[in-house]
Image (cartoon, grey):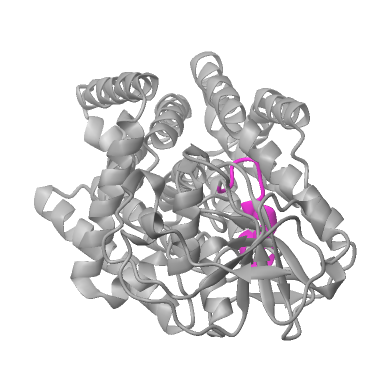
Amino acid sequence: MARTAVVALAFLAFMAGSAQATTFQVVVVPGLTLDDLEEVADTGAVGLMNPGAGPETSRRLALRALLTGEVRNSLREDDSGDRLLLGISFTEGPLGSVEGNAIYVGLPEGGRQPNDRRYPILVVGAGFEGLLTSESTRIPGVVSIADVAPTARGEEDGLDSQGATDTVSKLRELDDRIDENNGARLPATILVCALIVALALFSPTAAVPALAVALLTNLALGLLGISDFWTVMAVFAVAVLFGGPLVASALSTPVALGGLLVAVLVAYLLVLGIDGPSGALSPFGPTQNSRYFGLSNLLETMLLVPALGGAALLFRRFGSIAFAGTALLAFATVAGNRFGADGGGAIVLAGGFAVLAVLLYGGGRRALGIAVGVSLALALGLVALDAATGGSSHVTEALEDGPTGLAGDLGERVELSWERATGDWYVALAVTLMLAAFVFLVVRTLRRPNALRESPVVLSVAAAIAVSLIVNDSPTDVLLVGLTSYVAADLGMLSTRWPATSRS
C-alpha cells in the first residue's frame, strides 16, 4: 500500500543525525481527510493532529517537526541542531487498506500558510482504539505532531487512546468547535472589553462585577460546549451588559465583592482540575495551536483583577490570612500544572502580589525588593512542588535545566513577543497605541495625591501587566485585556470608596 521513501535531499540538507528504528511505521498520506478515516477508523485510534506552532506552517516545517519530534514556533524558526528520530513512508494515493503497526498522518501541502487547520491521524496496532489521547494536549482526540516520533519509537511519552464510538463524527464536532472558538475569540474579547470600559465610565460600580461575570460566562460556555459565533457574542453581551449591574446591585459591601472575585478563582480551579477540556475549549481558552490546555495569556490577564482585587478587598476585613490564602489560590489556579499550567502567569502574579503587599502594608522600596524576591521564590517553589508531585509543563522542564534553562525560556518569550508585536504594521500600530494609553493611565494614577496609599489594586494590576509584557508572548491580548482590567479596577474600585489604607 505504501512505498518506503527517502526524504528529499533538499529537506535533509539542514538536518543532522540519522533516523533510528521505530516500533510503528509512519506513513504520510497526501490529502488525508476525515472522510478517508470513515472506513478504517475501527481498525485503530483516530485524532486531529496540529502540524506546528505559531501563526504559520508549511509542508517543510511540518515534515521537520514530524521527523525530529520537536515543534518550533514559526516566528522563531531555527534549523540548527535538528536530529532525525525516525524514518517515514509516503503513499502513492488516498488511504486504502491499513496494515501492521503503523501511524498514518495527513500534512499541510505547499509553502507558508496559516496554521489554523488540524490534520487526521490514525494509529493502528498495539491495542490502539477509539480516540487518541496525548499528554501534550490533554484533550481526547487532539494531538501534536511532536507526539508522533515518541509513539513510533515506543517511548513512554507517546500517544495513548481511550475507547469511543462514532469517533470520526466526534472529531468533526471537535474540529468545528475549535474553529468556531478561534473565530469568535478576538471579536468576543473586543466586545467584552468595550462593554466593561463603557460600564466603568457610566456605571463604575458595575465594571469589576461585569469582568467577573464575563469570566464565569466563559466557563459556562466551555462546560456547555457552546461555540457558535453569534450565540457566543449574544451571551457575552447580555451577561456583561445586564449581569454586571445586577450583580453589582446585590453586592452591598467591599467584602462581598472580594468574595465574588475569589469565587471566580475557585470556579476556574475546579473546572480546570475536574474537566480540563471544557476550560481549554472555552471561547477565551487556548488556541489549540502551540498551547492546548490550561489558561491562555488572555485568560491569565483577565484573572488579574479577581486575584489582586480579591486579595486586597478581603485583606481589609480579614487581614494577612485572607491575603495569603487568596495569593496561594491564585498561584495554584494560574500556574499549577493540573490547572492553569501557565508558568509565565506565575511570574506575573509574583510581580503583582509583591507590589500589592508592599502598598497594603505601607512599605518602601526596600520592602518592595524583598516582596518581589519572596513572591518569585514562592512562585518557583510552588512550580517545583508541582513537579515533585508529578506535574509536568514547559516551566518544570525549564526548571530542570536550572537558571540557564529559565533564562533561555524567558529570552525566547521576549523575542516571540517582539515578533508578534512587530510582524504586521497594523499590529505594531495597535500595540503602540495601547501601550501609550497604558503608560498614560499609569502616570495619571501616580500623579494623584496619596496614589500609593489609595490605589494599591490599580498599581499592582499595572505592575502585573508590565511583567506580563516581558514574560508572555501575546502582547496584543495582554494590552487589550490589561487596559480593560486597569480601567475597571481604577474607576470601579475607586467608586466603591473602599479605603486602601494599611491594616494595623
Bounds of the magenta span? 272-286
Please check the rendered image and state whether residue 336 is part of the magenta-colored stretch, yes or no.
no
Q: Is residue 215 visible?
A: yes
> In this figure, what is the number of numbered marks?
0
488 shown above or below 14: above
Q: Which residue is depicted at the point 30% across and 73% down?
A: 399
Image x and y of residue 351, in percent: 28, 51
Residue 140's place in the image compared with 446, above or below, is below
Q: Position of residue 161 (x, y in %)?
A: 72, 75
Place of residue 133 in the rendered image (x, y in percent of width and height, measured from the top left):
67, 70
Q: Which quadrant of the figure has residue 249?
A: top right
Q: Is residue 501 left or right of residue 194?
A: left
Residue shown at 79%/49% (left/top)? 172
- Work out whether 301 lies above or below 407: above
Asked if residue 279 is among those painted magenta in the image, a careful observer would answer yes
Q: In the rendered view, does 400 fall on the left or right side of 279? A: left
Q: Please name whichever residue, 151 or 109, is drawn nearer the observer in this view of the structure.
A: 109
